[in-house]
Amino acid sequence: MKKITVAVLVLLLVASSVFAAGSQEKAQVQQGMTFSNWSGSEKASVEIFTWMIDTFNQKASAEDQVVQINWPWGETESQLAIRAQGNEQYDVAQIDIRMLPALAQAGVLADLNKVFGKEFFTTNFSEGSIAVGNFKGIQYGIPWTVAPMALLSNPKVLSESGVDFPIVTITDFEKACEMVKNNHPANKDGDLSNDVLPYAAMTKDSGTAAPDFMVWLWTFGAGVYDEQGKSALGSDNAVEALTWFNTLLQKGYIQLAMGRGDARTLFKEGRVAFYDDALMSKGAITNPSFGDISTYAFPQVHPVLKAGDKPQASGWGHLLVVIDRSPKKAQAKAFIEHLISEDVALKYFRENGMLPSKKSVLASDAVVSDYWSNAWTPVLAGGRLAETAGPQYAAANAVILEEMQSMLSGSKTPKQSGEAMASRINTL
């Protein structure tokens, strides 16, 4: 992928954004701190964000009072890049993990190892949570609420298919898919309308198919890019992953034209054994007619190639960052520590379901006693920032999906598909 200079990136972001902060500019205070975010303006989060800031300001000195600046989610990346190049004061911000590469490349963000110290990260967060805030070896983000994508399984469907073993390796996963396809009662009654699909893998939308497939690439020891920044999708390991994925279709374990919404609907109806999704999917797949959710939905780590390998997961979540030119880095540190403290994190968790990031808070009774959230905790260790996050995120994902579909349709072999992915991505 070609590097984008800071100047070009900012110009592109300026050109793509016509949003004006308007009256919020008047709220800027040179003596205080600014906290830029989108969640504080959303109906579900207004009250909790106001409380977070008020409880900090009650203890802070007059010159360290926090002022909140809200932008829509879609404007956050461009506004931070634009305004960090000007003279306005910006100190702390909430960003989506996918915004990190562009903002880091634009020189907007501070190196937080210099602000907090490396030990702060290793002491307080899991390896996976730290990784999603790291770009090219520099720690730019504090994990605020991070929950990588899990492989959701339906224990009821698996039990009805005779699957009575843990899904640890790829071999286990394949065996379970085979048993669901061949043994589940719904797949034997001749009524195709209620068939149960072993794995609802994403094969329709580039924004979901590419990041989800990336987990399998990592599992096979492959990746989108090599150390020199060139696409590695034509490598032997990548072709092995593509070949395996193609075999899933040939065996009837996955389907073409499957989107996340489709998978959620089928899972909610009890017609899918496995699919990939984030922690926030709970509301979309809850089906009271099946009883307690623990009986039909279990978020588990992805299977590994061989026993002992590290499970992989594609990161999802929000980070807290400090603007590099902020004159108040010490005060910003204190505010971020307040936001991730146990009292604040647990209140955010109870009111909005946002999973805390600190290991000590994840171990609290409030989280451990919550089945859904506690089940997600093991997934955190394997979280990684998607390799195609960044300025050319959409373009690279589109290439991966298009060539994957060519392979699944039979018009290209896995090797041809992988080589075409690599060639096309290298020209972006």
Image (spheres, rainbow, N blue to C red):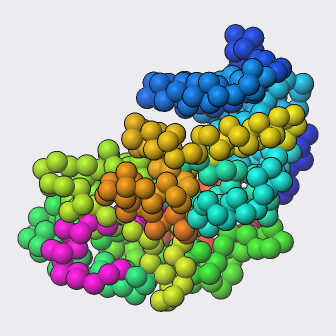
Quarter assignment of residue 267: bottom left
Residue shown at 32% from the left, 44% from the top: 283
Q: Is residue 309 left or right of residue 393?
A: left
Where residue 114 sits in the image (x, y, percent)? 83, 54
- Res. 92 in view: yes
User: What residue is drawn where x is 31% and y is 78%?
Assistant: 177
Determine the residue positioned at 67% across, 65% down: 122
Looking at the picture, how far across and down is residue 297, in whole percent?
A: 28, 61
Q: Residue at x 32, y 54 (%)?
A: 370
The magenta stretch spans residue 253: no
Does residue 299 sit above or below 338 in this rendering?
below
- Is residue 327 depicted above or below 150 in this figure? above
Q: Position of residue 20 (x, y in %)?
A: 72, 17
* Apparent side of residue 206 relative to residue 274 in the rendered image (left or right): right
Query: As drawn, is 300 to the left or to the right of 91?
Result: left
Asked whether 243 or 343 is in front, the reply is 343
- Which region of the structure is painted magenta? 149-167
